[in-house]
Image: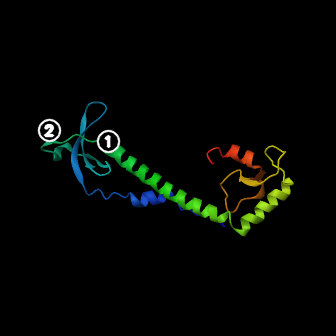
Amino acid sequence: MKYDEGNLYEQVENEFVCEHLDRELRKKTRSNGSFCFRDQCLTCGKDSGDISKSKIHNYPFLPPYDESLKDKWIEKRKEYYNELRSQKSDIWWEWYNEYLQSDEWQDKRTNVFKRSGYICEGCGNKRATEVHHRTYDHVGEEMLFELVALCNLCHSILHPDKE
């Protein structure tokens, strides 16, 4: 029972495809003080490279190249990625809680308790009542060595954010 969240980066790439339909000729000043002309997308900030100065007749009146357009596009992509990740997180927790009710998880849990002799592997004293994932990398297909038997107190130390 493996959770598959899909590739978030791929989803963002597919959603953030700019067709560069809203373009404008702009004057870009280079680091050495010279200038060039670029046809810049007003949505994502991408440009088409230098345009020959001989083709430009009204260059004194052209708006300046806007570097911030790229930054704004990148920021929108990040926001979308974080929104997707948050939604995936909600779905993951729903799946995980369902997994913890499965026979497969109950069998693994029992085996971990047996391996520890029902003694907490954190303090070595109290009765183990919880099975803790040392990593969530393989949840649903975890190996027993990725799980430890813990008492409530030791488990709460590892998850201080839980009540």
Q: CA distance from mark 2 to mark 1?
A: 21 Å
Residue 124's disc is none
Give the quarter of the figure containing the N terminus. Answer: bottom right
Of 96 and 71, nearer the camera is 96
Most extreme residue toward the right, as rendered? 117
Q: Are marks 2 and 1 in contact (CB under 8 Å)?
A: no
Query: Is residue 76 visible in this depiction of the protein?
Result: yes
Residue that appears at 34% across and 46% down: 72
Of 69 and 118, nearer the camera is 118
Give amino acid for label 1. Ser
Looking at the picture, how far across and down is residue 117, in whole percent?
87, 54
Query: Is residue 2 visible in this depiction of the protein?
Result: no
* Image quarter of residue 112: bottom right
Q: Earlier in the sequence, mark 2 or mark 1?
A: 2
Which residue does the numbered mark 2 point to in the structure image? 60
Which residue does the numbered mark 1 point to in the structure image? 68
Most extreme residue toward the bottom, as rendered? 103
Give amino acid for label 2. Pro
Looking at the picture, how far across and down is residue 158, in whole percent?
69, 45
Of 32 and 86, nearer the camera is 86
Judge from the rendering whether residue 139 lies leftward or rightward of residue 51; answer left or right: right
Residue that appears at 58% across and 62% down: 94
Most extreme residue toward the front, as rendered? 163
| Viewer-nearest of discs 2 and 1 | 1
Looking at the picture, how far across and down is residue 3, in whole percent?
61, 63
Secondary structure state at the residue bearing disc 2: helix
